[in-house]
Each structure stands twice: as C-alpha cells, then as structure tokens.
Amino acid sequence: MSNERKNRVDDPLVADTYTALAQERAPDHLNKRVLRMAAREGRTRYSRARAWMRPAAWAATIGLSLALVLELTRLPQIEPETANITVPKKELADKNDNDAKQTVPAAESQDPVSMDAFAPKDMAVLREADERARAQAGPDQVPATPRVDAGTAPDEDAPARRVTADENIPAKNATVDRDSAEHVSAKRLAAETASGAASLAVAAEEKALTSGFACPAKVRESAESWLACIKQLRESGQEDLADSEYDEFQRNFPNFADADADK
Amino acid sequence: MAASAESMARSTTALCSGATLPYAPAMGHTPDDSALMLRYKDGDIKAFETLYRRHNDPLYRYLLRLCRHRDTAEDIFQDVWGKIVKSRATYRPTAKFTTFLYRVAHNCFIDHLRRNKRHSGNTELDAELHSHPGEQPETLTERSLAKERLSRALLDLPDEQRDTFLLHEEAGLNLDEIAAVTGSNRETAKSRLRYAVNKLRAAIDEQSERQ
C-alpha cells in the first residue's frame, strides 16, 4: 500500500490539504494595474483604427445607397407589359403617327405580340392619326407612303381619305380630276380585299397617278382614248406630262401600231 | 475520494475552458480562452478582462509559492501579463491558453532567478504563510496543523519539484503540459511530481504519527 502510494502522482490528501491552504487571491491594486495596462495597450493599436474606420464605412454605405437611388430615379420608365395593356385610341393614333415617321425598332418588329398590340384596330383612329400627321407636316410636303397595308380591313371612309391625301399633290398634278382619284381609290380599296398581287397592281397605278401622269385611269383603259388624252396634253402645252403619259402608254400598249404616229 | 473529486473539479475547471466554441460571447457559452485572446487581439478589452479574471488568482498563487516572496511574485505577475498583452498580435491558438500562460510565467520566474541569485535564501514569505494570527500552536486543529506542515514542506521542496507540483495543482496541467511548460520530457515531469507529492504526504503523515 505504501509503495503504491509512493508511485502515484495524485494524492487526494495532499491535493485536499493544498486546496484548503491555497486561498490567496491576487490583490486588487495588482488587478487594476494589469487591467489598466491591458486596456491602454489594447486601444493604442486597434481601437484607434476602428474609431475612424466605422464612421467611414457608414458614410461610404450611405453615399453609395444615395447614388444608387438617384441613378434608378433617372432611368426612363419602362412598361414591361405593353402588349397586354389595352391602348386607348388617342395613344394608339399618336403611336401610329410616330411609326409613320420613324423606323420601327428591330426588337419590336421581331416581336409578334408587340406588333399585334400596335396594329390598327380601327381605321377611324388610323385616319385621325394620318390627318394629324399631315397637319404637323404642313401643306407643302408630300405625304408619306400609303400606310394602309394589304392585310388591313377595308374602310368605307377610305375614298374621302384618299381625296384628302390628293390635296397635297403638287401644283403640276392639279389637273387630275377628282373622279379619277376616287376611281383609283375605290379600285384600291377593292383590291385590298383581294389578293396581295392585285393590291400591288393598284398600288402601282396609284403611284403612277400621284407621280405625274395626267390622264385619268378611265381614259387609260383604251389605247385610243389614252392617245387622245396625250394629244390634248400636247396641244395644251403640257409637253412634260404628255411625254410621261406616252412613256406609260408604251409600256402598257407596246404593240399599238399608231403609237409612234400619235407621238 | 471526495478530495479526489474536488481536485478533479479544479482541474476540469481549468481544462474545460478550451472545450467550448470559440467566438461565442453572447450565446450562453463560456467563451474559450483562445477565443477571448483573439477577441482582445481585435480590440475587445472586455474579453481580456474575462480572461484575466479566469486566471489571475491561480497564477498569483503559483508565483507566490514559487517565488516565496510577495513583492517578487507581484512583479513577475505583472511582467507575465504584460508579455501576454504584448504577444496578442502574434498569438496563435495552437495550444491551450493555460499552457501558454504558465510557460510565460515559468520563463519569467527563471529569468528572475538568473537576475537575482539571492532569491534562494529569501524566506520572507515563510513566516507570513505559516503564521496563523490569533491562534496558539496548541489550539490549532489537526487540519490546520496539516496545512501548516504542507506549506512548510512545499517551501522546502526543490524549485523544479515545487514548480511541477504547483503547475499540477494550480494550473491543472497534465504531465505532458507540465513537460511542455518546463521544457522537460514527460517522464521527468512525472518523476518530479511524484517526488513532490511523496514529500508533501510524508510531511502531513509526520504530523499525524506524532500525535
């Protein structure tokens, strides 16, 4: 038993007695001195750095946030669901008006949903927009290319619109009578309901009419009457118009025997 | 048996300080010593205060009994904590903080010994530690006499054995940690501790046998 005890490093009696013996505590003045020294040393290197780093971090955060908010408020308003919104007629007219003068952006032209949204649903709206565009452009300017597409529905007010458009033709075309314009417009409207090829033909005829040909379409239906019209033009001194009419006549009746004689 | 449990509890109190999660100051956990030191490294003065309150009294008793002179113990005590404070910038929690702390204390004591050769003959504290003011020797209880003899025997121990015993009892270090602190190997530490315990036990038993 004694040998066993001598080989042990832990003796309960010794440990217990020592625990009862060792009750001293570090004096307060020593504690205060050490803690004061630790506080002084701890602040010198690290806390001073934090003293300016924290306000600087706050200032930077607030500054960046304000800049971000200002940037966001300056951005243009984007309407992501334009296609799903029912556009009022006035707004649609204005939009079509702008479309007539500007090229449609590629992104919009490639998006069928967007095109449907901007497609004219009412010809009255379209006509109103057309008139407003002419009013803004002034009486001296030639109107833009016809904006009624082949696929659009016919409109009973189209002849009147055509007449309004013809008012802006230059003075040298003033001799074109109102009947021929109405005739062309009526044919054009009829063609709009027919196939695309027919529509293109009517469009070409309308183009010919508006680009300086003086003889009405009804006169052009027969070679003899057309030549008579050309002859009247020459007699009245309108040589340029007669020449352009004759060129058109030759294209339409290339095999007419008396063409050269009447020239 | 009860004494063993109490001893183990004291040891565990010191050892378990490294068993909790680091950097958990406000979650109901007891902060790890190394975590407190790292927080102090980041400028948290309160963390150092907690760390200091945890170790100041055992370290003070260790130095007091190791030096056997109160003023010297207080000087070394301040020196130790000053070095701990200065070493916070380079502190790495690779070992238990207690081992680190008592290694610094041990080295400071060795430096003090080298500077003051007269230390070995200084017995200023002996009378203070042994005295029981207001008590006559014949009125001392058996337990008080045991403490008296233990205290005297402890001061009579060789420095290495006393150092090893105090590291075991006050710091709660095991043999490996004691070897790391004193710069010896485990067997040397074990031998020193065994000699110290046997001498102290013999001093206590001598009192009992005399009665």
Image (spheres, rainbow, N blue to C red):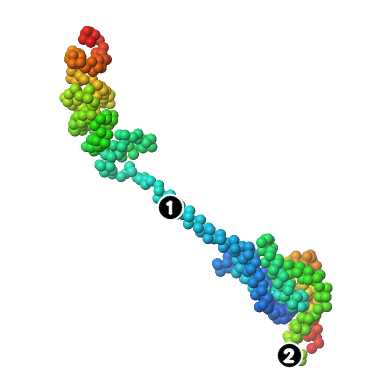
Image position of B130 with respect to B102: above or below = below
State the count of labels.
2
- Residue, disc 1: A69
Mark 2 surroundings: few (<14), some (14-19) or many (≥20) residues within 10 A? few
Residue type at tag 1:
Val
Badge number at residue B103 = none
Q: Chain of mark 1?
A: A
Mark 1 surroundings: few (<14), some (14-19) or many (≥20) residues within 10 A? few
**Residue in view at x 56 percent, y 63 percent:** A51
Between A67 and A31, the one nearer to me in the picture:
A67
Between A107 and B157, the one nearer to me in the picture:
A107
Taking the image as drawn, is residue A205 in sight?
Answer: no
- Residue, disc 2: B135
Q: Place residue A217 in its image quadrant.
A: top left
Q: Can you give x and y, in whole percent of width and height, for residue B67 in the image?
A: 77, 75
Image position of B167 with respect to B140: above or below = above
Residue farthest along the front direction in this orientation? A237
Q: Say left or right for A46 vs A195.
A: right
Q: Can you give x and y, in whole percent of width and height, for residue A34 in the image?
A: 67, 72
Q: Nearer the viewer, mark 2 or mark 1?
A: 1
Q: Are marks 2 and 1 in contact (CB under 8 Å)?
A: no
Secondary structure, mark 2, is: loop
Using the rendered image, report if marks 2 and 1 lie on a common chain. no
Taking the image as drawn, is residue A145 in sight?
Answer: yes
Q: CA distance from mark 2 to mark 1?
A: 82 Å
**Residue in view at x 64 percent, y 68 percent:** A40
Secondary structure, mark 1, is: helix
**Residue in view at x 68 percent, y 76 percent:** A30
Image position of A241 with respect to A141: above or below = above
**Residue in view at x 62 percent, y 71 percent:** B50
Residue type at tag 2:
Glu
Residue farthest along the left direction in this orientation? A179
